[in-house]
Image (cartoon, rainbow, N blue to C red):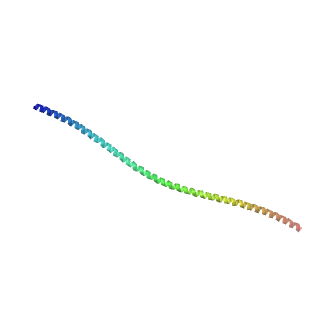
Amino acid sequence: MLVNELNHLKEQECQYEKEKAEREVAVRQLQQKRDDILNKQSATEALLDASSHHCIYLENEMQDSRKKLGQMRTQFQEIRDQLIATIRCTEEMEGDAQKLEVENAMMRKTIKKQDDQIERLEKILQHLSLMRQVFKS
């Protein structure tokens, strides 16, 4: 009976040792999993930190781009306004040039008429001068 009990206790001890070894293996596996998870968490945090910095960088770039776009729009509007003013000025100048051409044509006609009239008067003067000479002699 004592032998049976001793054998039984030895079997239980073996069983406990086996279970202890299995638990130690399980503990090591759990510790490894924990370490893997902590490493992944660190990598994830580093990636999140890098992503956060990149996001901030992109937000700053977006803000700068919006500012530049606003400046470009302002410059575009200024150039557009200048172009419109130049077009208006050009149209006015073309209108003035046409008026001057008309006035120039009218003055040429007037000058032509005056030239013709001067020629006639000179002929009349020459004729009168000849007549005077004839009458004097």
Residue at horizontal 69 percent and vertical 59 percent from the top? 102
Left or right of 113? Residue 49 is left
Which quarter of the image is occupied by the N terminus?
A: top left
- Is 24 located above or below residue 94 in the figure? above
Residue 26, by quadrant, is top left
Q: Foreground residue, 112 or 137? A: 112
Give coordinates of residue 59: x percent, y percent.
42, 51
- Is 56 located above or below residue 23 in the figure? below
Residue 5, by quadrant, is top left
Count of numbered circles in the view = 0
Residue at horizontal 64 percent and vertical 59 percent from the top? 95
Residue at the limit of the structure toward the left, as seen here: 1
Left or right of 89? Residue 49 is left
Left or right of 10? Residue 103 is right
Give coordinates of residue 124: x percent, y percent.
82, 64
Which quarter of the image is occupied by the C terminus?
A: bottom right
Residue 118, by quadrant, is bottom right
Residue at the limit of the structure toward the right, as seen here: 137
Residue at the limit of the structure toward the bottom, as seen here: 136
Give coordinates of residue 122: x percent, y percent.
80, 64
Residue at horizontal 38 percent and vertical 49 percent from the top? 53
Give coordinates of residue 108: x percent, y percent.
73, 60
Left or right of 28? Residue 59 is right
Residue at horizontal 36 percent and vertical 46 percent from the top? 48
Q: Foreground residue, 131 or 56? A: 56
